[in-house]
Image (cartoon, grey):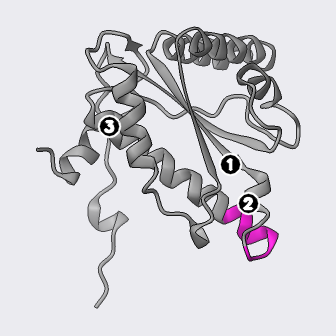
Amino acid sequence: MTNFKELASKRRTVYHLGRNTEVSQEEISNYLSQVLQEVPTAFNSQTSRIVIVFGDKHEALWQEIYNVQEQVLAGDMWDMMSGVIQGAQAGLGTVLFFEDRDQVAQMPTNSERQEAYKQNNSANNQYAAWLALAELGLGASLQHFNIGYAQGFDKSIKELLDLPASYELVAQMPFGSVETPAQEKDYLATEEKIQVIG
């Protein structure tokens, strides 16, 4: 059995995804559901809404993102990000992370703290989902395309998936088989990142 440290090390950003896995959609959905049900939230507010997309809807999602970003990005940035989008579309599925603004507004605190807690709630879910996918032997990455509730940037995605208007898209996590392993990464020295006092 993998311990937490090993699992945390296994979790990496993988852009070259595929569909070469024996893990079924049902197994993935069930495991993510079990893990994400236990994620803590401020005031037990449970503001996060997770949507797991497979099949034609997964492909349509990334085609919509491609179409929008092609109009927004240019030059080297488009050259790089278009490859990321295509790599995501080639994967098995996507976990979409939304925050329900109606639920966020019910947190018993001011709007500034609601915003901070909303981001914390979503981040907890994102990391938990990434670890769960890694435990299933799947690769994933975390993306932030078409986000911006106030500007309506996530509206077309909600329409595509028939989701409530109160949902605010925070991030996407495309996942699938690891077709090309993650690159090596540099680490900040532990003593520089982590201080132990007392």
Q: Separation of disc 3 and disc 1 at Cα?
A: 31 Å
The answer to whether residue 172 is above or below residue 122 is above
> Which residue is at a point 40% across and 15% down the rendered structure image?
16
Residue 104: which disc? 2
Residue 185: which disc? 3
Residue 99: which disc? 1
- Estimate the x, y position of residue 123 in percent, counting from the top left: 53, 52
Amino acid type, mark 1 = Glu
Q: Separation of disc 2 and disc 1 at Cα?
A: 7 Å
Amino acid type, mark 3 = Lys
Q: Tell which residue pokes out farthest to the bottom in this image.
A: 198
Is residue 168 rendered to the left or right of residue 15? Answer: right
Q: SS at mark 1?
A: strand
Q: Are marks 2 and 1 in contact (CB under 8 Å)?
A: yes
> Which residue is at a point 15% across and 45% down the rendered structure image?
2
Q: Earlier in the sequence, mark 3 or mark 1?
A: 1
Q: SS at mark 3?
A: loop
Is residue 63 rendered to the left or right of residue 55? Answer: right
Residue 19 figure quarter: top left
Q: Earlier in the sequence, mark 2 or mark 1?
A: 1
- Pick the quarter of the image with the N terminus: top left
- Pick the quarter of the image with the C terminus: bottom left
Q: Earlier in the sequence, mark 3 or mark 2?
A: 2
Give the extent of the magenta segment. Answer: 108-116
Crowd class of label 1 (few under 14; some 14 to 19; many from 20; radius 10 Å)? many
Given residues 139 and 70, the one toward you in this image is: 139
Is 111 magenta? The answer is yes
